[in-house]
Amino acid sequence: MSHRGVWITGFAQRRRRVIAGAAMVLALACHRSNHLPAVVVVPFESPGLPRLASDLSRDIAQRMAAVSSGRYTLIATASAPRAHFDLKAIGASAAADWVVGGRITGAGSQIEIECDLVRVSDGAHVSTMRFDRRSSTDLAELESKAAKKIAAHFSRRIASVE
């Protein structure tokens, strides 16, 4: 019984990887056939607030997909090894034209969010946004407001450059 359980677990993991790979290939095929710029959102760096970083990255990706209006393709939220947080290299490996990434610093009532929009072709930081929490603002509220503003601003920047 335990042997069968191990096989089923391994099969489920392989199936998830195949589905994720197929989704990436499909997104890339659509991107290349439509000649739309591709955007990838990478998880934010945040040694002290990993959950906020994960939620913020996911929220930005969802909001950018929602406001894209067919101007670009959102490939996925990519993961990146923290030792090599080079947005241009990450974008190139994901076959993206643009990368959104950032960092969250501080703790308690003093938190700073910094987010960059990087053009992969030349590594240029096209836009940077900063948000500060210097009061008792709720983290969920900060994350929601930041994601909404970042997605709207970066979407406009991508559309104006392309």
Image: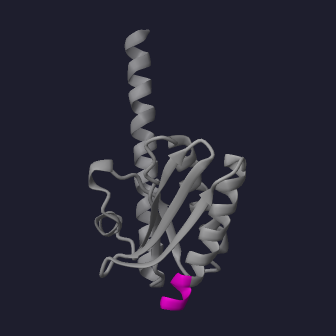
| Figure check: 136 above or below 70 | above
| Figure check: 66 above or below 142 | below
Q: Position of residue 93 (x, y in %)?
A: 30, 64
Residue range corresponding to the magenta coloring: 157-162
Residue beneath the point at 35% across and 70% down = 95
Residue beneath the point at 50% across and 65% down = 115
Residue beneath the point at 69% across and 51% down = 135
| Residue 158 part of the magenta-drawn span | yes
Of residue 131 and residue 27, the one placed in the foreground of this image is 131
Give the side of residue 28 with respect to residue 66, left or right.
Answer: left
Of residue 31 and residue 93, the one placed in the foreground of this image is 93
Q: Residue 107 falls in which quadrant of the image? A: top right
Q: Position of residue 123 (x, y in %)?
A: 31, 77
Residue beneath the point at 33% across and 49% down = 82
Q: Residue 78 falls in which quadrant of the image? A: bottom left
Quadrant housing the N terminus: top left
The main secondary structure of the magenta stretch is helix
| Residue 44 part of the magenta-drawn span | no
